């Protein structure tokens, strides 16, 4: 059955579909505001006329290309192409500024490939086991793990803990706007109908990073001459075997974070890349290098966000539960062809399942070849004058935000958050804690309320679960470690 599944993709039509999917995915992922989600949504109707394998192979290829493609604009423009590449801007942008754009891209592309390969291994060999563990996650466990993830904020606050905490609180507060998911109370809507749905993630992300970056560049004044770009010279992917060995633990740790977070529905790559970056910074012997342009940060984020692809497919295929919006659309593609994901899928459609695994692997290899082959073109983007480039990016930002939900309110959201992000940046408030707080706070709140309802308002029941208790203790440990570390830093400064 395994061999039959592998052989099922060895035909020109499936290869052509996968190649097309990867290229389209990279384009959608690299253009700020479009994202892999939009690419999959637009191509989903095309799968209706295809065979089941070709249709799902196209969607998987789009997912792989779109997730990895976000690193291109994150490094070259300091604007994340997708929510999964937010943390890549922290070190990718500074590397590009000092003429190492090709190395940053090479590192990002290679470790995107590695992260996806590791997640494929998890998907093939331990999917049923991991899915069973994830199935045990209830409100207690989700609350504890997301609370723990929120403590990762302390690894991204830089030298000023107070400003980092304030940024996180801003993100948490903004996430509360709209109709509460439990109870239906209207919060911070100010009588505006569009506010009832709250702020969508993509407009907030585009505002804080893309629009804010455009405003920051515009504030310094735009010069007519072309930007100077370092001559393209790179051996391999731009890093040595010594650097690879030094980053091996960082790579494995980040991949495990990506797979683990990818398995949990509703969290996904938007969180995994920031958490992996924060953990890498905390575990580094030289945390002061992070944010100045080191490959450690790029390796952590790109390994994790691509590892979350395979992680999110695990509950989809084994339990029929989509992990994020993209896998929800892949679920739609499966049902479109009369395929019902779940525990019996491996038994009833084993050839198709292993064909999907093979398509996932081949799409990853195609992604590596296409992105590596396009390095020279990508670096040339930096030579385009900013007075030409920035209006084009701004146009894509507007089109992307409007195209998500077809609401002009989302466009205004992006513009307003752009101004907020600009002033935060001017006053040296970190932006990453805002995003992490914005993404995780609703999950923490929802599962806290569910847990309290389930336990009849007895909070101590949260400690009755071994998994929840473990993450609660880790949360306390991280906070204590941070306080001690902050005191040591202040004493050294004095």
Image (cartoon, rainbow, N blue to C red):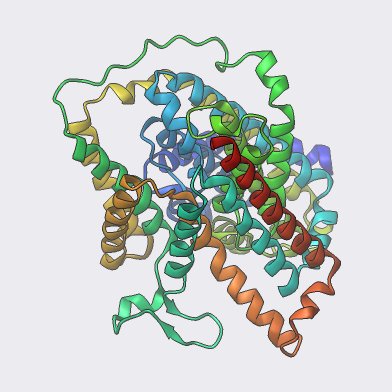
| Residue appearing at x 60%, y 57% in the figure | 327
Horizontal and vertical percent position of residue 465: 83, 71
| Residue appearing at x 50%, y 20% in the figure | 103
Horizontal and vertical percent position of residue 142: 70, 67
Q: Nearer the viewer, residue 33 or 50?
A: 33
Instruction: Classify residue 390 as left or right of residue 103.
Output: left
Note whether 346 is above or below 89 in the view shown: below
Q: Is residue 12 visible?
A: no
Instruction: Classify residue 86 as left or right of residue 469.
Output: left
Q: Nearer the viewer, residue 149 or 315?
A: 149
Of all residues, the one furthest to the bottom in this rendering is 456
Note whether 115 is above or below 260 in the view shown: above
Horizontal and vertical percent position of residue 180: 49, 81
Quarter residue 187 falls in: bottom left
| Residue appearing at x 73%, y 49% in the figure | 352
Where does the C terminus fall, quadrant-wise?
A: top right
Instruction: Classify residue 218 as left or right of residue 34.
Output: left
Horizontal and vertical percent position of residue 66: 50, 42
Instruction: Classify residue 144 as left or right of residue 494.
Output: right
Note whether 283 is above or below 173 in the view shown: above
Quarter residue 420 falls in: bottom left
Q: Nearer the viewer, residue 477 or 244?
A: 477
| Residue appearing at x 75%, y 37% in the figure | 6
Q: Nearer the viewer, residue 133 or 434?
A: 434
Where does the N terminus fall, quadrant-wise?
A: top right
């Amino acid at each position: 059955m395994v061999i039959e599944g592998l052989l099922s993709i060895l035909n020109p039509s499936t290869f052509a579909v996968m190649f097309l999917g990867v290229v389209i995915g990279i384009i959608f992922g690299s253009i700020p505001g479009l994202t892999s989600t939009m690419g999959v949504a637009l191509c989903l109707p095309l799968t209706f006329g295809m065979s089941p394998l070709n249709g799902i192979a196209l969607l998987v290829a789009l997912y792989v290309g779109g997730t990895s493609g976000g690193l291109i604009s994150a490094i070259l423009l300091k604007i994340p192409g997708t929510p999964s590449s937010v943390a890549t801007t922290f070190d990718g942008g500074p590397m590009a500024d000092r003429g190492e754009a090709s190395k940053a891209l090479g590192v990002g592309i290679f470790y995107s490939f590695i992260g996806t390969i590791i997640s494929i291994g998890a998907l093939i060999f331990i999917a049923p086991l991991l899915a069973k563990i994830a199935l045990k996650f209830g409100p207690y466990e989700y609350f504890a793990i997301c609370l723990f993830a929120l403590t990762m904020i302390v690894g991204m606050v830089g030298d000023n803990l107070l400003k980092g905490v304030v940024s996180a609180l801003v993100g948490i507060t903004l996430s509360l706007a709209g109709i509460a998911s439990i109870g239906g109370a209207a919060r911070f809507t100010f009588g505006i109908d569009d506010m009832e749905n709250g702020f969508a993630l993509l407009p907030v992300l585009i505002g804080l990073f893309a629009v804010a970056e455009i405003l920051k560049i515009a504030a310094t004044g735009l010069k007519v001459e072309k930007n100077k770009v370092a001559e393209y010279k790179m051996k391999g992917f731009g890093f040595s075997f010594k650097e690879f060995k030094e980053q091996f633990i960082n790579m494995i740790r980040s991949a495990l974070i990506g797979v683990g977070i990818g398995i949990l529905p509703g969290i996904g790559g938007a969180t995994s890349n920031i958490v992996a970056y924060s953990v890498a910074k905390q575990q580094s012997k030289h945390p002061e290098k992070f944010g100045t342009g080191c490959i450690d940060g790029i390796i952590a984020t790109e390994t994790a966000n691509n590892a979350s692809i395979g992680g999110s497919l695990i509950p989809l295929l084994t339990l029929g539960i989509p992990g994020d919006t993209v896998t929800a659309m892949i679920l739609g593609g499966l049902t479109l062809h009369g395929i019902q994901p779940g525990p019996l899928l491996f038994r009833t459609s084993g050839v198709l399942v292993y064909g999907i695994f093979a398509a996932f692997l081949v799409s990853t290899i195609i992604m590596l070849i296409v992105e590596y082959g396009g390095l020279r073109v990508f670096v040339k983007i930096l030579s385009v004058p900013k007075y030409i480039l920035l209006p084009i990016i701004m146009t894509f930002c507007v089109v992307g935000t409007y195209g998500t939900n077809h609401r002009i309110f989302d466009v205004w959201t992006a513009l307003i958050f752009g101004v907020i992000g600009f002033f935060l940046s001017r006053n040296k408030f970190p932006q990453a804690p805002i995003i992490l707080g914005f993404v995780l706070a609703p999950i923490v709140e929802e599962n806290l309320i569910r847990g309290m309802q389930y336990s009849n308002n007895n909070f101590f029941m949260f400690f009755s679960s071994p998994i929840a208790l473990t993450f609660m203790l880790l949360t306390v440990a991280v906070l204590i470690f941070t306080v001690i570390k902050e005191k040591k830093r202040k004493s050294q400064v004095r």
